[in-house]
């Protein structure tokens, strides 16, 4: 099993240079709040909260921040967030799926619509891109010197993984949505704590653009990601070697 997920690699390199720590924490805190609100504040009995806390630790979020987020969901400071999504097309026909957590849906709708209009995109109806993306479990593990890659790959295959990608710094494991739990449990049994583990929307097919057109699309994607209400933005732009070099 092998893969060449250039986008995830580029995002890691690019993210190290321009990601704002506060925005990353804001998105994780919202996920913790909604997970705790829906399933309670005990991670032992709330798998979604347990996963959110795991991702918070992977992002080096202080323990106090995590505890305050849980209190905002189940304590006297309770905050309510709505999960919502948007689907449409960026310039040049690139499919875009946006996931949001918001405490003001009107504000978020207006902001997303404004971004689509500003950058020449077209906002569609929910469900219009259901055929473009599949939900997959993605686990990112820091590659340590004592990590036996052969043993890990075999264990992941047994647990349901369908792709196992290794680069210089990380191991990325992909599995069907239905096998997310079994892969997560197997990693736990092996004493491996992922840097990140979550369900993501992976495009069934990608679309290649010239470098200048692709840069315009990425500028639109980044504008969406800069919105505090936006949790995740998925697209089917193919990250070619030429584009990767242009972004370095």
Image (tube, rainbow, N blue to C red):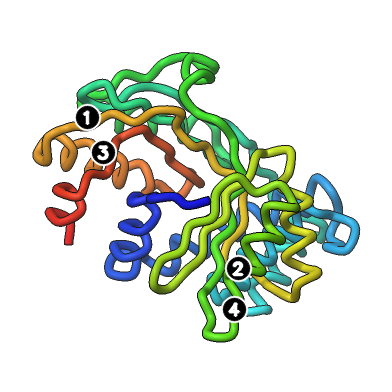
Question: x, y (%) of residue 101?
Answer: 57, 42
Q: Secondary structure at mark 1?
A: helix
Indicate which disc, 3 or 2, sits on the residue closer to the N terminus: 2
- The residue tagged 3 is 220
The structure residue drawn at horizontal position 47% and vertical position 19%, both measured from the top left corner, is 129
Q: Quadrant of the C terminus?
A: bottom left
Seen in the image, is 224 located left or right of residue 154? left
The structure residue drawn at horizontal position 31% and vertical position 57%, both measured from the top left corner, is 10
Q: Within 10 angstroms of label 2, few (less than 14), some, or many (20 or more) residues? A: few
- The residue tagged 2 is 150
Indicate which disc, 1 or 2, sits on the residue closer to the N terminus: 1
Marks 1 and 4, how far apart at CA: 47 Å
Q: Which mark is residue 71?
A: none
The structure residue drawn at horizontal position 55% and vertical position 43%, both measured from the top left corner, is 200
The structure residue drawn at horizontal position 47% and vertical position 69%, both measured from the top left corner, is 170
Q: Secondary structure at mark 2?
A: helix
Q: Are marks 4 and 2 in contact (CB under 8 Å)?
A: no
- The residue tagged 4 is 147
Question: x, y (%) of residue 145?
Answer: 52, 85
Q: Within 10 angstroms of label 3, few (less than 14), some, or many (20 or more) residues? A: some
Marks 3 and 2, how far apart at CA: 40 Å
Question: Farthest left residue?
Answer: 212
Marks 3 and 1, how far apart at CA: 9 Å
Q: Which mark is residue 118?
A: 1
Q: Secondary structure at mark 4?
A: loop
Seen in the image, is 13 located left or right of residue 3? left
In depth, the one of 207 and 46 nearer the eye is: 207
Indicate which disc, 1 or 4, sits on the residue closer to the N terminus: 1
């Amino acid at each position: 099993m092998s893969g060449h997920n250039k986008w995830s690699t580029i995002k890691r390199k690019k993210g190290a240079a321009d990601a704002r720590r506060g925005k990353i924490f804001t998105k994780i805190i919202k996920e913790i709040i909604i997970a705790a609100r829906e399933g309670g504040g005990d991670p032992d009995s709330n798998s979604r909260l347990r996963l959110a806390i795991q991702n918070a630790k992977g992002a080096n979020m202080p323990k106090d921040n995590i505890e305050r987020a849980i209190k905002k969901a189940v304590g006297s400071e309770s905050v309510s967030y709505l999960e919502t999504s948007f689907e449409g097309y960026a310039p040049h026909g690139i499919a875009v799926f946006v996931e949001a957590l918001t405490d003001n849906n009107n504000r978020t709708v207006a902001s997303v619509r404004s971004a689509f209009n500003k950058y020449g995109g077209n906002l569609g109806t929910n469900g219009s891109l259901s055929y473009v993306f599949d939900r997959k479990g993605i686990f990112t593990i820091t590659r340590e010197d004592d990590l036996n890659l052969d043993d890990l790959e075999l264990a992941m295959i047994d647990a349901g993984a369908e792709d196992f990608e290794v680069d210089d710094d990380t191991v990325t494991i992909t599995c069907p949505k239905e096998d997310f739990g079994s892969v997560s449990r197997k990693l736990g049994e092996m004493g491996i704590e992922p840097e990140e583990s979550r369900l993501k929307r992976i495009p069934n097919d990608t679309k290649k653009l010239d470098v200048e057109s692709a840069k315009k699309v990425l500028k639109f994607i980044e504008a969406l990601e800069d919105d505090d209400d936006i949790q995740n933005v998925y697209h089917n732009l193919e990250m070619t070697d030429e584009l990767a070099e242009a972004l370095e």
